[in-house]
Amino acid sequence: MKIGVFDSGVGGLTVLAELRKALPEASFVYFGDTANVPYGTKSAEKIESLCRSAAQRISKMGIDALVVACNTASSLALGAIQEELGALPVFGVVEPGVGAALQIQVEGPILVLATRATVRSHAYLYRFQERMKELGRDSPALLELACPLLVPLIEEGWIDHSVLHLTLNEYLGAYAARFSSGIAVLGCTHFPWIQAAVEKALPGWVVVNSAQTVAQEVSLKLVSAHLPDERSGEVEWFFSDAPAVPDFARQWIEDTKRR
Ligand code: DGL
């Protein structure tokens, strides 16, 4: 089985890494829409139209299922992508992100760090509220924080840079000062690249990266993905603007080719 993985840029690589571990028999196609990154600062209409165009391109790549490894696209355009792909199974990342956070029991609020568009959509907030209701659990404080400067810094390759640490302190300082613990959900697939820096900015907090949960869900639901593919483990790479791929991601891609 060939599985497509789609993101605006290099964020989806964090999900692809876990998918390759959970589904060693599958082969993959990665599409990063680097010509249009970031998605998260754009309007809902623009994001939907970019996702429809990307889905049309991806539909010609011979895949059997698609993982939308982008929270912004999952929050605002999952239905549109599914429409473009017809009967093909399409997986988003919001639901598994909520599931991963709900497995953790820690005093304090749940803080979703995401792009501006994801926060505006309140996709996480609504899904958390629904799940809490279904589980009959008292809801902790649910907070959403747009961090629009982080994606450009990550795409620039500044994943352990003084500017990144300063920016995180600006965004998170008030939360770190107010709460000694809590759950920070990385509600953007770019953010696991800077997980260590987020943990440093939020001492005492648990930082949730949902990539593993996404991979588990896909692995459970796509039973046929476990049948050996003649190109098992291989990844085909497509970027709409190749020179925009930062060095750390390029290195990761090269290492993946050798594995
Ligand atoms: N990685 C994406 C996300 O999970 C999108 C980042 C962006 O393009 O703004 O939201």
Image (cartoon, rainbow, N blue to C red):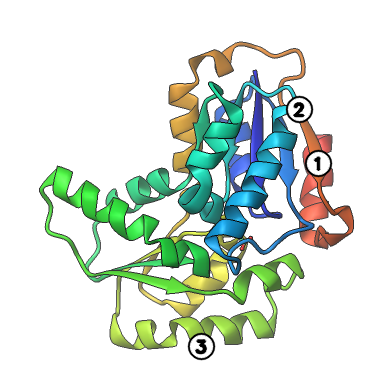
The image quadrant where one finds ligand 1 is: bottom right
Q: Which residue is mark 3?
A: 170
Q: Quadrant of the C terminus?
A: top right
Name the spot of residue 116 as percent of width and height, x first.
51, 70
Q: Earlier in the sequence, mark 1 or mark 3?
A: 3
Q: Amino acid at mark 1?
A: Phe
CA–CA distance between discs 1 and 2?
10 Å
Sequence-wise, which precedes: disc 1 or disc 2? Answer: 2
Task: List the residue tagged with mark 2.
Answer: 61
List x then y, in percent, for residue 94.
43, 49
Dot 2 amino acid type: Met
Label pair 1/2, CB-CB below 8 angstroms: yes
* Mark 2 within 8 Å of ligand 1, using the beta carbon: no
Any part of residue 12 in sight: no
Q: From this viewpoint, which residue is outermost toward the right?
A: 243
Say which of marks 1 and 3 sits in front. Answer: 1
Q: Quadrant of residue 106?
A: bottom left
Label 2 and label 3: CA atoms lie apart by 42 Å
Q: Which three-letter amino acid code belongs to the residue tagged 3?
A: Glu
Q: Which residue is mark 1?
A: 238
Q: Nearer the viewer, residue 47 or 106?
A: 47
For label 1, count other residues whose C-alpha is less than 10 Å away and answer few (under 14), some (14-19) or many (20+): some
Q: Earlier in the sequence, mark 2 or mark 3?
A: 2
Who's the residue at 49% across and 30% down the image?
Answer: 218
Tell me which residue sits at (50%, 76%) in the image: 200
Residue at 82 percent of width and 53 percent of height: 251
Residue found 63% across the figure and 21% down from its top:
64
Please tell me whether mark 1 sits on a helix, a strand or a loop. Answer: strand
Residue at disc 3, secondary structure: helix
Which numbered disc, 1 or 2, marks the residue closer to the eye? 2
Q: Are marks 2 and 3 in contact (CB under 8 Å)?
A: no
